[in-house]
Amino acid sequence: MHREEKEDAGADTITNGFNLDLVPLLAANEVVLVKLDLRDPAGEIISENFYWLAAKSASYRRLNGLPVVFLSLTAKSFASKNIRVQVELQNTGNVVSLANKLTR
């Protein structure tokens, strides 16, 4: 499902958006992933949000059944006043990879 709507919203204001009817999707799948992008007038993304919504708490367990995904990682470090590391994760497979976490 894809839905797009344009709203004018001033700075520091609240603007109501549209309602997503997820009931049919939740009934069929139990878990729904929703991606919300906020764009400026030029169409550039200024905020991205990703939500995992479930019909009931136990439905989140279905995410444990997702296939294993192997990611490739490259890292570059930059020495300056502060040490900075740029990391790129790439999913070269055809299965989605969710909630990846980098730790040291």
Image (tube, rainbow, N blue to C red):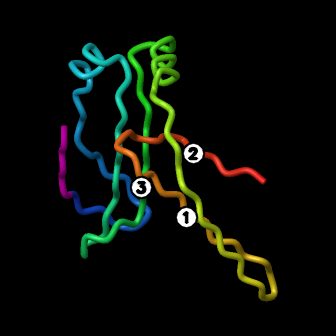
Q: Which residue is mark 2?
A: 100
Judge whether 53 appears above or below 61 on screen. below
Q: Nearer the viewer, residue 21 or 87?
A: 87
Mark 2 vs mark 3: give the one in front: 2
Q: Quadrant of residue 55?
A: top left
Q: Residue at x 30, y 18 (%)?
A: 29
**Which SS type dominates the magenta stretch?**
loop
Q: Which residue is mark 3?
A: 48
Callout 3: few (<14), some (14-19), or many (20+) C-alpha neighbours within 10 Å?
Answer: few
Instruction: State the image coordinates of residue 17 (x, y, percent, origin top left).
Output: 26, 46
Q: Which amino acid is tagged 3?
A: Glu
Q: Quadrant of residue 81?
A: bottom right
Q: Which residue is mark 1?
A: 88
Q: Magenta residues?
A: 1-6
Q: Is residue 29 left or right of residue 63?
A: left
N-terminal label among 2 and 3: 3
Disc 1 on helix, strand or loop? Answer: strand
